[in-house]
Image (cartoon, rainbow, N blue to C red):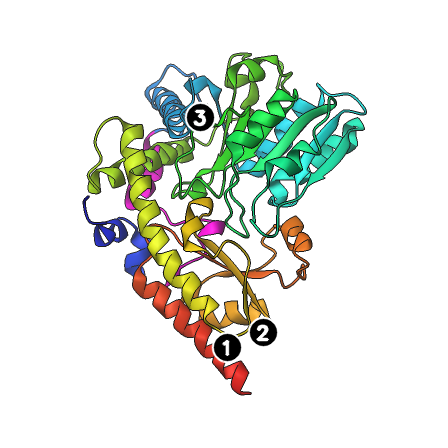
Amino acid sequence: MTAYPIDLIRAAFPALAQSRTAYLDNPAGTLVPHSVIDAVAGAMATASANLGGRFAASERADAIWRAAHEAAAEFVNAGSWQEMIIGPNMTTLAFQMARVIGKTLVAGDEIIVTRMDHEGNISPWLAMAEDHGLVVKWLAFDKETWRIEPEDLAALLSPRTKFLALTYASNMTGSINDVTRLAAMARAAGALVWIDAVQLAPHRLPDVQAIGCDFLACSSYKFFGPHLGILWGRDKVLRALPPHRVCCQSDDLPDRFCTGTPQTELLAGLTATIDYLAWAGETTGATGTRRERMAGAYQAFDAYEADLMRRLIGGLMALPGIRLMGIANANLFAHRVPTISFTHDRLSTHRFAEELAGHDVNVWSGHNYALEPARHLGLSEEEGVVRIGIAHYNSEEEIERTLAVVGALVRQDAAS
């Protein structure tokens, strides 16, 4: 196997060359490579026009729009680029589709949301339930396994279950759910299944064909691209839904769900992001189609990130007073992404974040919009957790520096 090319990878990201900052705030948004920045700037310079015109700039915009949808389709392994809906962010797309899906439901129908999700995959569906008189059932995650267990879902399913909103990977604990099994159970009961893959996409390559869901949403700014939300929907399901659109808008897919003028420059950046992932695969020895090269990149990312995660978790757990929120057993790392959250029995989470920031280490503290996981774990909503998120461009030195700062603060507290 080709050695992981960390120096080559880091050289692709201009932010990493400009300072010694350790960007470990990745669950909130990742860095972007040179190629994505160049693509966005190029589109703004040469394709700053609306779609459908008979002049060169508009034709270039048309080509960018189509290429981005094709690239997004490859990323999630969609059956067609027409199944891809691209919007400003995942949460906005969820609220938009909640209005649409809600029109197909009747009072008394049941929906299931989880105690593991980001609010972007809870609030839209609660609003849908309120608007249409739906019954909301809450699905908790197991505090021992840190995952949503099939038997807990089975206990909630009924003939009236019409919709399940499920997270692929938690933005607090990093746990990965067995979404293939859970989706199969819900669809067998007659429910539509929506999967939030925002936190999975930076670390594992999504495959909607293998999962068998009805919708899968992610955000390209979480996987090294521009600020866009990406939604895949099953063709048959999308065609059956009544869209909200202006009267002169096309009824074709994906046009019927794409309102307003598209963000052409960001679409160019999205295609460049997919190409970057394929390039990263090439640097680790992958060949073949663009998706095959992306798969090679993710395989290399996973192995590299697991080593950094092993060191970070081991170092944190060796410190007194630290409580880890998530899977700590290295033998179970296949069931988590490298988003590591912790609390301390005396020190504020915000104190850790401030101290780390003072040493050029970026992390987040608080609930990070994971309100339900915080409540389920009995955490203070204001304090939440300290969240450290590893990406494939982070270095061993950055992990050691982070542990040194955290360790010094813990030891200082213990001595006081």
Residue type marked 3: Ala
Is label 1 or label 3 in front?
3
Q: Earlier in the sequence, mark 1 or mark 3?
A: 3
Work out how far the residue at label 1 is from the one at label 3, CA to CA, in angstroms.
44 Å
Q: Is-magenta flag for residue 108?
A: no
Q: Which residues are magenta?
A: 19-46
Work out how far the residue at label 2 is from the one at label 3, CA to CA, in angstroms.
43 Å
Position of 206 relative to 233 (above/below): below
Q: Earlier in the sequence, mark 1 or mark 2?
A: 2
Image-based side of 263 in relation to 416, left or right: left
Bin the neighbour count of mark 2 within 10 Å (Cα to Cα): few under 14, some 14-19, many 20 and up: some
Q: Which mark is residue 347?
A: 2
Q: Residue at left 52%, top 70%?
A: 352
Q: Which residue is mark 1?
A: 410
Bin the neighbour count of mark 1 within 10 Å (Cα to Cα): few under 14, some 14-19, many 20 and up: some
Helix, strand or loop status at disc 3: helix
Bin the neighbour count of mark 3 within 10 Å (Cα to Cα): few under 14, some 14-19, many 20 and up: few
Image-based side of 186 in relation to 308, left or right: right
Q: Position of residue 383 (x, y in %)?
A: 63, 64
